[in-house]
Amino acid sequence: MEIRKMNVVVVLVLTSIGVIQANTFHFPDNFSFGVATAAYQIEGGWNKSGKGENIWDRITHKRPEWVKDGKNADIACDSYHLWKIDVQLLKQLGVDFYRFSLSWSRILPTGFSEYINWNGVRYYSDFIDELLANDIRPVVTLYHWDLPQPLQDLGGWPNLLIASYFEDYAKVAFQLFGDRVKTWITINEPNEICDTGYGTGAAAPGIEESGTLDYLCGKTVLIAHAKAYHLYDKYYRNKQKGEIGITIVSRWNEPKTNSTRDKEAAERTMQMQFGWWAHPIFSTKGDYPLVMKERIRNMSQCQNLEESRLPKFTTNEIEYIKGSSDFMGLNHYSTWLITDDSENNCTIVSYENDMGMKNVQDPSWIPSAASWLKDVPWGFRKLLQWIKVEYDNPLIHITENGFADVGELHDTGRIHYHRGYLNELLNAIHLDGCKIKSYALWSLMDNMEWQDGYTLKFGLYYVNFSDPLRTRTPKSSANFYKELIRLRRIPRDTPQLIVI
């Protein structure tokens, strides 16, 4: 069915709310709404105007079979050329802010700061100006998984030198855009960078060295983040008057049974997945979670290693990383059930084996098009409650939350998902006292979903990738979100899309 040959009208129709009851709470007056994207997934223009090659360019070109549909993001949504249209979509939604990432390779093609690509700088500068001219606040992520290939040729994130190169890149970004950007996110989802990029190989650069390179990567990423934070704090904060933090992804890990072992396994999984990143930054003690250090040390000893596979932080590094964030950026999508598997074969070297657990999802939970993503809103509130207790109620920006389908215009599944999750977010604010200040829905439009290619759709706007013009068409969820932002509460009625 050719979407571009249709006239599409979005109207409001009264429908049943279903099992999710309308929440009477309103979002606080100082709460802000936005949407999120990432440079590699939407920009295209992969080698335009001086841009350098990144690790996703390399792996999708050299190993197209590695992507589910064999495609890449050479053009993607073509936001490199269609950015003014994207700003108008944002304006139509009525968002307060837009979270997007800079392409390191578009600004510094070699990865190093001695050569700046001014065409790339101009692209982002013009885009930021256009956002501000339309009263949309830019929230900028410095790194969203697209490492310049020349830096990967040096070993990538497991090489501690990358932390210094990241600091150099951050300095360029602060100098060029910090007069207009007031919220910075250093790094998006370090777990995915390290676990899937250097552990399981499910993300670029596709290296499978779980239990070793992923941990080396983790130390570098945390130090890189801290370097960027301290750089901003020391030299730019007073003049530019902004804030800077990190975004961590976390699912909720629920014990599958009430057994002590399953409860301990679920908590251990929270500590070793989320706490791996949050504990060094947001805990008053700093460093990795104790259970993570003990577990990996014991497994390493069992494997006849003299030292733990988890690289240690020095005392100075612990202090340097601790407290290095003005806020906690949180990405959340779904929930898993955890059972204990801590007595498995210690000869297996892997991060998953180190955690000592097995995870499944309840088959009765509402599915999405992604096998790992189920609609489980109560897990969102439990996660927020856990973070409040574990890290003394930090200031949180929800930087991603989204639902996958295959591209339906009348996307009732997405609306149901966001209705439920935002309902639980309101409960966390008003009933639990969680300090949540913003919410960014993933994503503005359908895009290249990494190894899944274009088989999954997360957008509020449908993108016709077979059309050279990459036409964008609003889905029902776009009008739902627009109405939510206007009302500052969850709409009692669901907007539907009528195609005529």
Image: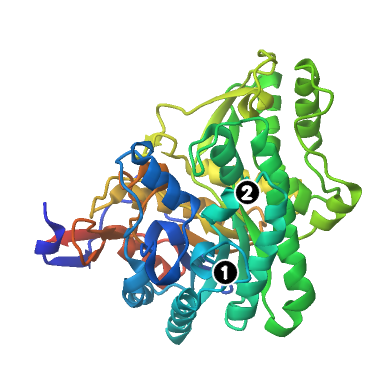
On the image, the x and y values in percent for residue 114 come to 63, 71
Residue occupying the point 32% across, 62% down? 77
For residue 32, above or below residue 386: below
Where residue 275 sits: x, y (%)?
71, 42
Question: What percent of the width, then of the height, locates residue 198?
Answer: 58, 38
Rendered position, 153 above or below 97: above
- Disc ID at residue 154: 2
Q: Which residue is mark 1?
A: 28
The answer to whether residue 442 is seen in the rendering is no
Local secondary structure at mark 2: loop
Q: Is residue 324 visible?
A: yes
Q: Are marks 2 and 1 in contact (CB under 8 Å)?
A: no
How many C-alpha atoms fall within 10 Å of the one at disc 1: few (<14), some, or many (≥20)? some
- Against 301, residue 101 (above or below) is below
Image position of 196 (left or right of 435): left
**CA separation, marks 2 and 1?**
47 Å
The answer to whether residue 123 is left or right of residue 459 is: right
